[in-house]
Amino acid sequence: MNDKTTVNVFLVNGIRLSGQLAAFDQFAVLLESGPGAQLVFKHAISTVLPANGRSQARDPTEVPVSGD
């Protein structure tokens, strides 16, 4: 993701937060939006997606299959 990419952060309790990831460490992420910032502990995060709705993940059909 680019430095200025806006993301949606979905929490385990269903709340959606939106903003830019400013920083992170082992336990938390700092999400900046509007006039302030929010510190969110990673154990409370369910999903992080780009706000534009397009994931940068590969299509599941492109996942390499391991040979047995």
Image (spheres, rainbow, N blue to C red):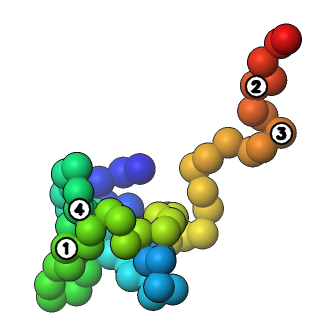
Q: Amino acid at mark 3?
A: Thr
Residue beneath disc 3 = 61
Q: Residues within 10 Å of mark 4 (few under 14, many from 20)?
A: some
Q: Give the mark nearer the N terminus: 2 vs 1.
A: 1
Which circle marks residue 7 in the picture?
A: none
Residue beneath disc 2 = 64
Q: Position of residue 11 (x, y in %)?
A: 44, 77
Front of the two marks 4 and 3 = 4
Q: Amino acid at mark 4?
A: Ala
Badge 1 vs badge 4, beta-carbon distance below 8 Å:
yes
Q: Give the mark nearer the N terminus: 1 vs 4.
A: 4
- Alpha-carbon span between mark 4 and mark 2: 32 Å
Badge 4 vs badge 2, beta-carbon distance below 8 Å:
no
Residue beneath disc 1 = 39
Per the image, label 4 sits on a secondary structure element best described as: strand
Which circle marks residue 28 in the picture?
A: 4
Quarter-wise, where is residue 32 in the image?
Answer: bottom left
Q: Position of residue 65 (x, y in %)?
A: 80, 23
Q: Residues within 10 Å of mark 3 (few under 14, many from 20)?
A: few
- Alpha-carbon span between mark 2 and mark 1: 36 Å
Q: Residues within 10 Å of mark 2 (few under 14, many from 20)?
A: few
Residue found 61% across the figure and 62% down from its top: 54
Q: Amino acid at mark 1?
A: Leu
Residue found 77% across the figure and 43% down from its top: 60
Quarter-wise, where is residue 5 in the image?
Answer: bottom left
Q: Give the mark nearer the N terminus: 1 vs 3.
A: 1
Q: Is residue 18 visible?
A: yes
Per the image, label 1 sits on a secondary structure element best described as: strand
66 or 23, nearer to the observer: 66
